[in-house]
Image: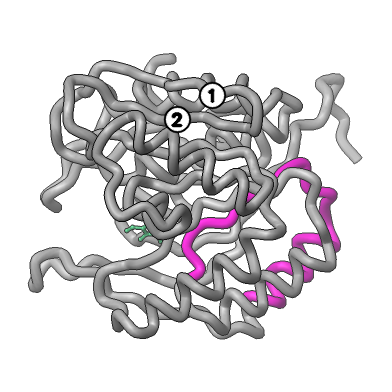
Amino acid sequence: MSDSLLPPPPIALTIAGSEATGGAGAQADLKTFQARGVFGIAALTCIVSFDPKAQWGHRFVPVDPQVIADQLEVEFACYTMDAVKVGMLGTPATIDTVAGVLGEQRPKQLLLDPVLICKGQEPGAALDTDLALQKQVLPLATFVTPNQFEAMSLSGLAAIDTVEQLIEAARIIHERSGAVVLAKGGVRMAGPDAIDVFYDGQTTEVLSEPKIGEVAVSGAGCSLAAAVTAELAKGATPLEAARAAKTFITQGIRARVASAAPFDALWQGGPA
Ligand code: PXL
């Protein structure tokens, strides 16, 4: 019960890893939800700590599957989710647990940010994780936000270096999954603009903003996907959500926070 005269906020859940420095992962998702006026909840799947003594490589510790199940149990017991985002899961055992719960709960809006590999993981383990994610979580997703590398893996295209190839990848991923696709070229595609491609089976829209520097900013991909999730939770259409998210992260990259790591961090709280 609330004493407020204001309507209750939409509620969004992120199922994601902790990235200790607050640039990416669940921290970025929660900050984005808050900035977009959505009540944010997180179930942590793993803890990532970059290693400043070893070229900032990823140290990765999975959360025990039972602890992930416990978090999801209480979260779904407390709230009806307006939207759910899935970020880094990290291991096949985690994917089993999360896919099991999502298969039962069947959230109406389920955005999958298919974080496939994290440096510091065994390549073999990463391949298992990749296949499990495609087999068990992708079929449940209503919206998917692969980056350039993940779009190659999900579409089977050998290279994605041009906008045309990114559009082709988005179409293939939609055909395979049925989900709305926002393929994130971001700063990685050559050229003066940061380009993302939206495809929902009918509409193809190239979202483009002039690049702000050439170096990737930590949290850009997570925050873009989290902003889409927040807008979907508020009732936006997928295309409206993608457009609003692109504007939001462009602003967040402009307002980025300098870090001693080789990458700055997006700031969700800059002036709108
Ligand atoms: O940006 C991908 C990502 C997602 N989630 C977590 C991460 C990272 C990258 O470092 O650590 C937890």
Q: How far across and how far down the image is residue 14, in percent?
A: 60, 53
The location of residue 264, given as percent across then percent down, is 20, 41
Q: Position of residue 205 (x, y in %)?
A: 50, 21
Residue 215 at what x, y percent from top left? Answer: 15, 38
The amino acid type of the residue labelled 1 equals Thr
Calculate the distance from the C-alpha at mark 1 to the C-alpha at mark 2. 7 Å
Q: Is residue 112 magenta?
A: no
Judge by depth and name the residue closer to the eye, 174 or 52.
174
The residue shown at (56%, 31%) is 199
> Please, what secondary structure does the residue beneath circle 2 have?
strand
Under circle 1, the secondary element is: strand
- The quadrant the C terminus occupies is top left
**Residue, disc 2:** 197
Q: Which residues are magenta?
A: 68-89
Q: Residues within 10 Å of mark 2 (few under 14, many from 20)?
A: many
Residue 156: image quadrant is bottom left
Residue at disc 2, CB closer than 8 Å to ligand 1: no
Say whether marks 1 and 2 touch (CB < 8 Å): yes
Residue at position x 44%, y 38% from top? 168
Left or right? Give the position of 200 relative to 49: right
- Quadrant of the frame with the N terminus: top right
Is residue 125 left or right of 215 when viewed as pictured? right
User: Measured along the vertical axis of the image, is residue 196 above or below residue 121?
Assistant: above
Q: For this rendering, which residue is in front, 106 or 67?
A: 106
Mark before the other along the chain sequence, 1 or 2: 2
The type of residue carrying mark 2 is Val
Residue that label 1 marks: 204
Q: Residue furthest right?
A: 1
Residue at 30% of width from left, 44% of height from top?
160
Position of 28 relative to 99 (above/below): above
Left or right relative to 261: residue 119: right
